[in-house]
Amino acid sequence: MSSCPALPEGFDFTDPDVYQQRVPLPELAELRRTAPVWWNAQPHNIAGFQDDGYWVVTRHADVRAVSTNPEVFSSNTNTAIIRFKETISRDQIDVQKLIILNMDPPEHTRLRQIVQRGFTPRAIRALEKALRDRATRIVSGAAGKPTGNFVTDIASELPLQAIAELIGVPQEDRLKLFDWSNKMASYDDPELAITEEVGTESAMELISYAMNMAAERKACPAHDIVTQLVAASDEGNLTSDEFGFFVLVLTVAGNETTRNAITHGMHAFLTHPEQWELFKAERPATAADEIVRWATPIVSFQRTATQDTELGGARIKEGDRVGIFYSSANNDPEVFDRPDVFDITRDPNPHLGFGGGGPHFCLGASLARMEINLIFNAIADTIPDIRLAGDPRRLRSAWINGVKELRVTYA
């Protein structure tokens, strides 16, 4: 199926110009109704992919099916990123296969078993007091200003400090992480003027920084997560290179996703004031998951079919790219009652904001929920009368539901 009469001719669900304005939820809803697995044609060999398009997977059940079947739908063949900058080379894409996000079992299984040591419930609980104190300081610092950009004043700070706390990066280096992460993830936004060279250089600087940390811990083990990952050779360990690439993923994923969830969550609260009043009064445990569902910070990832198969009535050929659209799945009315309503008491809430299950389910889901709860508790306690002062300014990105600026009044 290659056409959908209700869509504009040539509409592309990975067009970064579209996402700079909005997430195309009406168009995704039309596909869920009429062509849930739909071929989105693209110019041949766009952005390094040697094909003529990809399949758009829109229903919750189908996104889960793709996510939980890595034998048929590979993350490694073309990586998980559905669209790169148009001038990227195939060699630059293939280098990214060294990242755990872009691996398949059994190599992915081996690395995941090692890195998940840092994300046990006990490890996450051990961070809570320090992160609660940091959340209070972050919000108190913003409260001293009459107005500001919520993204840089509040939303970006706790995720960065949490990553630094988790892997032992000195807090004074957290701005380096923020800068490297932004430059790697913002290549499609001309306002930020990030060239491929700058993005690559930032990635190498971050990897080098992490590799130096790994080398130090191998020489002088300490009681921290880095030592657990690189020096516990009797249990299997990461090489310095593997640790470097892991920190790269952790920095980008932990920064971009949680920062944008917090930003979209604040915007949702301030445009649904009854929900903000409810949160301030009751602090429901269900709020964090509804914020993630509503925000869906990663619009989509992709997989590549390893064999001919069928999905949602569509015949998919070996080698076809398949885009799994989490934003669509999280608004599927077959799963969510009134999905267009922001409801912080929603329960159950089987959203796919942390991925569709399977081997690539987000390692940091519990940490992200904790950060969201802590930061909004601090906001509710310290600046309960926060107000919008302008519309969000969105990131130009093909796959990140990002916000660069959200002007608010703190006083």
Image: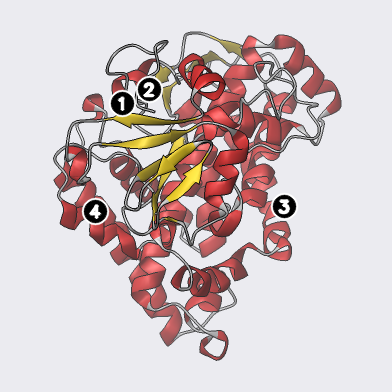
Report crowding for label 2: few under 14, some 14 to 19, many 20 or more residues within 10 A (C-alpha). Answer: many
Establish if 389 lies above or below 188.
above
SS class, disc 1: helix
- Reading the image, the residue beneath label 3 is 129
SS class, disc 4: helix
Contact check, label 1 and label 4, Cβ < 8 Å: no
- Reading the image, the residue beneath label 1 is 16
Camera-side residue of 308 and 215: 308
Mark toward the start of the polypeptide (2 vs 4): 2
In the rendering, which numbered label is found on residue 252? none
Report crowding for label 1: few under 14, some 14 to 19, many 20 or more residues within 10 A (C-alpha). Answer: many
Q: Three-letter amino acid code at disc 2?
A: Tyr
Q: Residue at x 39, y 79 (%)?
A: 239
- Reading the image, the residue beneath label 2 is 19
Camera-side residue of 131 and 345: 345
Q: Is residue 230 left or right of residue 211?
A: right
Q: Quadrant of residue 273?
A: top right
Q: Residue at x 69, y 16 (%)?
A: 341
Q: Is residue 10 left or right of residue 88?
A: right
